[in-house]
């Protein structure tokens, strides 16, 4: 199953290779850097099925988590408003909607209409990706979205008793127990001085990666 929204750094294409490293069965699934949830949703695929009863999904991006909650709890409403947004797609409409991304349907529309479907914030925490003008105006492409995916993902979230929370990754792993599975997919370190890492204001630097490595070792020692 594919996720219902695009996201920078999504592991959809390599999900099977990642999931092959997971045990066949575990307690609670934790994903503290949720993004599109590509690995969580891929565990629904027949060749990647894993047995677990519940999921704890979190991210520090409140608009993202708000969108996930809406898709799980009221998918029909999300889809209905999203259709309206897609029909009005234009540069002026997009620029206006960038200021209203707390609305789950608007969030999905903006991510679909943004250049390279990228999410990036400036130092003030403001979304600052431009509209896909080359696609929509120059090449005349139509904006599209697979509405069925919203319903499919909604049912799977409910099936796995997903708990969704706005939380830092370190807060999200406080309740991890022996036998649980934690999947970390943090922002990459930049491979050039101007490399992109600002998915959120402040980025995720080398110090955070070192601390994350230490926490991984502690979780392993706990039996997760």
Image (spheres, rainbow, N blue to C red):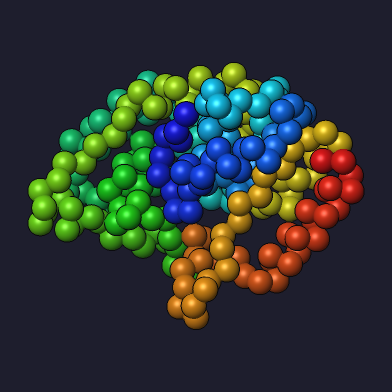
The residue located at (83%, 55%) in the rendering is 217
Dividing the image into 4 quarters, which one contains the C terminus?
top right
Please tell me which residue is depicted at 69% across the width and 37% down the height of the picture.
22
Quarter residue 189 falls in: bottom right
Q: From what the image shows, is residue 35 above or below residue 208?
A: above
Whole-percent x, y for residue 34 in the image: 57, 44
Is residue 167 visible in the rendered image? The answer is no
Where is residue 175? Give x, y as percent: 81, 39
Question: Whole-percent x and y of residue 39?
Answer: 56, 39
In the image, residue 79 above or below residue 204 = above
In this image, 197 relative to 115: left or right? right
Examine the image and state in which quarter residue 29 appears. top right
Query: Where in the figure is residue 152, as x and y percent of width and height?
Result: 44, 22
89 with respect to 56 (left or right): left
> Residue at the bottom extreme?
193
Vertical arrangement, residue 182 with respect to residue 91, above or below: above
């Amino acid at each position: 199953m594919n996720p219902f929204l695009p996201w920078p750094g999504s592991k959809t294409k390599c999900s099977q290779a990642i999931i092959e490293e997971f045990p066949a069965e575990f307690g609670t699934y934790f994903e503290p850097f949720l993004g599109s949830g590509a690995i969580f949703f891929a565990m629904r695929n027949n060749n990647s099925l894993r047995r677990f009863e519940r999921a704890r999904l979190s991210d520090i991006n409140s608009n993202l988590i708000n969108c996930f909650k809406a898709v799980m709890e009221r998918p029909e409403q999300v889809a209905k408003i999203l259709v309206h947004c897609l029909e009005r797609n234009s540069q002026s409409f997009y620029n206006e909607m960038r200021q209203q991304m707390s609305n789950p349907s608007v969030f999905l529309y903006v991510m679909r209409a943004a250049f390279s479907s990228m999410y990036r914030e400036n130092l003030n925490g403001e979304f600052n990706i431009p509209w896909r003008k080359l696609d929509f105006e120059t090449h005349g492409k139509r904006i599209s979205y697979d509405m069925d995916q919203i319903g499919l993902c909604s049912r799977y979230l409910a099936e796995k008793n997903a708990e969704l929370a706005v939380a830092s990754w370190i807060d999200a792993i406080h309740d991890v127990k022996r036998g649980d599975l934690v999947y970390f997919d943090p922002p990459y370190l930049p491979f050039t001085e101007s490399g992109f890492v600002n998915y959120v204001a402040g980025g995720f630097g080398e110090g955070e990666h070192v601390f994350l490595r230490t926490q991984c070792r502690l979780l392993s020692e706990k039996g997760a």
